[in-house]
Image (spheres, rainbow, N blue to C red):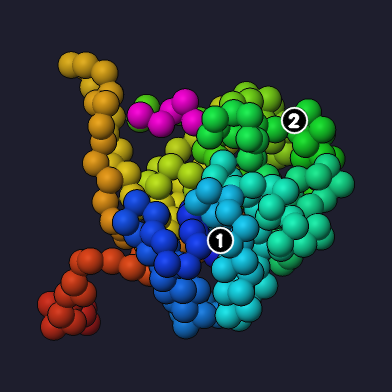
């Protein structure tokens, strides 16, 4: 069984600062502690972008210092809040591949996991792949042949009928055409939207992890009118995705490492054996 963790949207700021009133450094520490305590049997973790809130050098330095706490291998990629040049300068040029992007390929336990850098500073927060990166993705899918493939990137690959739909992966149709060339795409997992969504796009299954920052209410367009101009934000929960996959199935659990809900008393859930 392959097991890995997806964490997204750390939105780190320099020490002493907050992001939208949230101490994102403290949240990162809690997320790392939770993974170390409850999921140290995982094969690896992917941090799927928006590591820094504004791409600040001090935020990446803070992140670099904290990475040593993790007990499992960790792979990184970038989101629209990140600055690739600053990230590579501080975290190391070895995080970039031959396309210059922060992409990774992991072959493990009969699976191929492809991690994609969908950040582009010229899109105003949306994601985009250059043709060279789509060509790179096609080659990595072709190499996988009969292996099941799981893809992780920052941006969601289709509209969710919410206020932030203009910030999706811009060339999603071209992306889907490449991905659909492989016969066994198990999941495309993203962060970015600060909410849980699952579905399919052109037959490709996807889900999103709410992540480490604030959560956004999925305020949808209705028959009575357009999407409201303002949507509710909540302080949490802080959430990770847990991917479990074997030759027959792939499951993604969403688990909260930070949650305001009380745990119910065990006495309310006593299992009685059947006669």
Neighbor class of circle 2 (other Cα within 10 Å; few <14, some 14-19, many 20+) is few
Q: Which secondary structure is most common in the magenta stretch?
A: helix
Going by the image, does 145 lie left or right of 237?
Answer: right
Query: Depth-wise, is mark 1 or mark 2 nearer the camera?
Result: 1
Q: Give the quadrant of the N terminus.
A: bottom right
Q: Quadrant of residue 183?
A: top right
Q: Give the quadrant of the C terminus.
A: bottom left
**Is 213 rendered above or below residue 62?**
above
User: What stretch of residues is rendered in magenta?
Assistant: 163-167
Q: Position of residue 185 (x, y in %)?
A: 64, 44
**Total number of numbered discs in the rendering:** 2
- Residue closest to the eye, 102 or 73: 102
Q: Is residue 239 visible?
A: no
Residue extending farthest front = 16
Q: Residue at x 59, y 28 (%)?
A: 123
Tell me the element at label 2.
Answer: loop
Q: Position of residue 170 (x, y in %)?
A: 59, 26
Neighbor class of circle 1 (other Cα within 10 Å; few <14, some 14-19, many 20+) is many
Mark 1 vs mark 2, CA separation in Å: 27 Å
Residue occupied by mark 1: 59
Residue 130 marker: 2
- Residue closest to the eye, 270 or 241: 241
Q: Residue at x 62, y 66 (%)?
A: 61
Going by the image, does 55 lie left or right of 35?
Answer: right
């Amino acid at each position: 069984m392959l097991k890995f963790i997806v964490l997204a949207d750390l939105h780190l700021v320099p020490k002493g600062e907050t992001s939208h009133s949230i101490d994102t450094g403290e949240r990162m520490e809690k997320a790392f502690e939770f993974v170390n305590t409850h999921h140290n049997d995982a094969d690896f973790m992917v941090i799927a972008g928006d590591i820094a809130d504004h791409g600040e050098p001090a935020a990446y330095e803070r992140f670099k210092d904290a990475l040593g706490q993790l007990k499992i291998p960790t792979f990184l990629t970038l989101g629209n809040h990140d600055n690739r040049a600053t990230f590579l300068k501080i975290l190391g040029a070895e995080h970039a591949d031959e396309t210059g992007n922060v992409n990774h390929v992991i072959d493990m336990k009969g699976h191929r996991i492809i991690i994609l850098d969908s950040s582009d500073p010229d899109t105003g927060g949306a994601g985009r792949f250059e043709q060279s990166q789509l060509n790179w993705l096609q080659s990595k899918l072709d190499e996988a042949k009969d292996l099941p493939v799981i893809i992780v990137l920052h941006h969601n690959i289709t509209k969710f009928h919410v206020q932030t739909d203009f910030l999706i992966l811009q060339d999603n149709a071209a992306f889907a055409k490449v991905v659909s060339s492989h016969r066994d795409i198990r999941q495309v997992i993203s962060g970015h939207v600060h909410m849980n969504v699952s579905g399919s796009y052109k037959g490709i299954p996807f889900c999103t992890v709410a992540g480490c920052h604030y959560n956004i209410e999925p305020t949808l367009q209705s028959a009575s009118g357009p999407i409201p101009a303002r949507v509710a934000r909540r302080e949490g929960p802080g959430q990770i995705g847990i991917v479990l996959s074997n030759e027959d199935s792939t499951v993604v659990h969403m688990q909260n490492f930070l949650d305001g809900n009380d745990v119910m008393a065990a006495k309310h859930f006593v299992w009685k054996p059947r006669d």
